[in-house]
Image: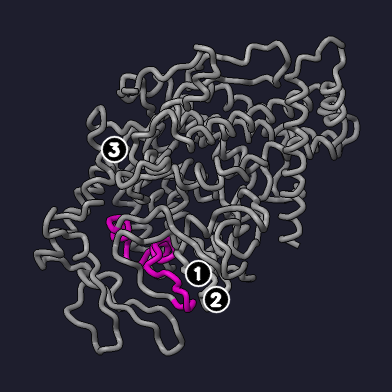
Amino acid sequence: MVNKMKNIYNSAKIIIASLSLTLVTSACSDDFMEPDSISTFDNNYIYSNVDDARNGVNAIYSYFNQDAFRSRLSNNMAGNTDIEHQSGWNSNGDRYQIWNLDALPSNRDLDIVWTNAYRAIRDANISIEGITASGNLENEDETVRKTMNQLLGEAYTLRAYWYSMLIYYFGDVPYVVAAPVAGDNFNLPKTDRNEILSGEIQNLIEVEENMLWADETRYGVEQVNREYTLAMIARLALQRGGYYLKPDLSQARGSNYQEYYTIARDYAKKLIDLKDRPLPTDFRQIFLNNVTFQTPVNSEVLFEVPFSLNSGDVGWNIGIEVEGGPTSSHNYGSGNNYMAMPVTYYFSFDTLDVRRDVTCGLYRINTDFEPEFIDGPMNISQGKWGRHLLETPPGASTAKSTGINWPMMRYADVLLMYAEAENELNGPTMEAQNALRRVRQRAFEDADWAEKVDQYLTSVSSSKDSFFEAIVNERAWEFGGEMIRKYELIRWGIYSEKMSETVEGLKQLADEAYNGTTDLPDYMYWKLDEEGKFTILNRNSRVVAPPDETWNQVPFLLDLHDDTTTYDEWILRDWENYINGPNPGVARYIFPIPTIAVENSQGTLQNDGYGF
């Protein structure tokens, strides 16, 4: 049933994407002499009934199935951070330029994101206008009325997502809020990012109460629902109230930032009050649900992108590495991992925190379908997903298109956003502490709560600053590999600071291992037990020698040292532009507007500021 739902939903998106593009092409043609053009007739018809209106809104979702999202925004472009990283200096390729913060205006990946973002926004505007003009928002038929209000909320929420991403990557951008009409001026200037975010937040505030909860919708968490929209209000409000990069490469935040922290707190709290749910106790199962195509409602995931069974890159460019191909002994295909976990992140976890070994993959799957230790400490993978866990092997020669959904928002995020906003406004109140407490409790066994939860909360709740640091750390441990850390570091204004801490931490680990003063694993020892289970002898500490010869020895922290450069080159260079860029101490995360967009704007847009 789940697979059927995914196929039906995504097929509809693809079909209606084509229809929507046809309508837009007609709407932008020169033949507009008659008062009612064919495009106007079709658009009016589509939004006159719930079935076709559903298809019209589905067109907005189709852009999740483009490379702009499925491999770029969802994961590739969201590094480097203190918990996820990739080397960008060893190639001039498009994604390497982005990882190295030195992308050119000709960068194809930036063009893909810019183009598809505005196509999604265009289709959202068409749906918003069509639904609003249909009269069905006040229809006497309750089913029609509720459905059309839900669809309107979906369109607004999806548009807000794309504007949020455009702002994170390009700063001020054109703010288009109307459906395209022939004769309009399509070359709009940039709008201040704060104005855009304020407008999108207000739109969501106005529509959320008329939306449906996930358990009231046809596709549950595979479509935008009221839970996700409430959570997006909080997320956007924290973005609006947070720090951002100005064209002079200084960091700023609005003088009214507390107003937006209030919105974030209130709407996170509204979701908690109206639709609270216990956090699932099994942290690993949250992500195993993605791989096995399970989509429970009223649980952890509020909304996830529903990739069809022949689409999506989860388990291809993110997740546990799988060596496959036609000569392999298994039929699971090949999976890479473009974003590794710094070993500093691995050792930042409490050793009893169950999230660490779910999040940080220390093994890969070889061609014999056996787990083996990763190739050094720079290749710790996102362990939350893996194509080798698919219930039906996709084929020995497969790679992309695993069908694994991508989670966009989890309930733990709502709890931590509430705790953060409440702390910013009032300090570490008991309400803020209890929200953090719920997330911490799942991370540890009940027997450890007294020390790891209660005592920990007491120690970090002595001040607003110490509680904020606890939130920064908790979000790292909770969401590693989910590729949202970049946006958090930006809005906190500590992006460069955290990159510097990471490099210094890696150097310290290397020095201590080389000098023989570390208590951490300079080598790790692993084997497959008699049942074929992958076992590591010393995940947490250094051992002088293994108990017997059945253990494989691999350099771990010692691998961070280089006899020529002292430290491995990736330590010295992966984060360099984040620390000592055009303005040292400030990460220039803003990228140039793509060349084609600048050229097509007829002089309206240009790449000014940010050192471009």
Query: At label 3, which amino acid type do we have?
Result: Tyr
Secondary structure beneath disc 2? loop
User: Are there few (<14), some (14-19), or many (20+) residues within 10 Å of tag 1?
Assistant: many
Give the labeled residue for mark 1: 324
Residue at 59% from the left image edge and 34% from the top image edge? 116
Give the labeled residue for mark 2: 330
Q: Are marks 1 and 2 in contact (CB under 8 Å)?
A: yes
- How far separated are the C-alphas under marks 1 and 3? 35 Å
Query: N-terminal of the two: label 1 or label 2?
Result: 1
Q: Nearer the viewer, residue 142 or 583?
A: 583
Residue 364 part of the magenta segment = yes
> x, y (%) of residue 570?
25, 51
User: Are there few (<14), some (14-19), or many (20+) residues within 10 Å of tag 2?
Assistant: many
Give the labeled residue for mark 3: 578
Q: Within the image, what quadrant is residue 543 found in? A: bottom left
Q: Quadrant of the C terminus?
A: top left
On screen, 10 above or below 375? above
Residue at 34% from the left image edge and 61% from the top image edge? 379
Query: At label 2, which amino acid type do we have?
Result: His
> x, y (%) of residue 84?
37, 51
User: Are there few (<14), some (14-19), or many (20+) residues within 10 Å of tag 3?
Assistant: many
Q: Nearer the viewer, residue 364 or 467?
A: 364
Which numbered disc, 1 or 3, marks the residue closer to the eye? 1
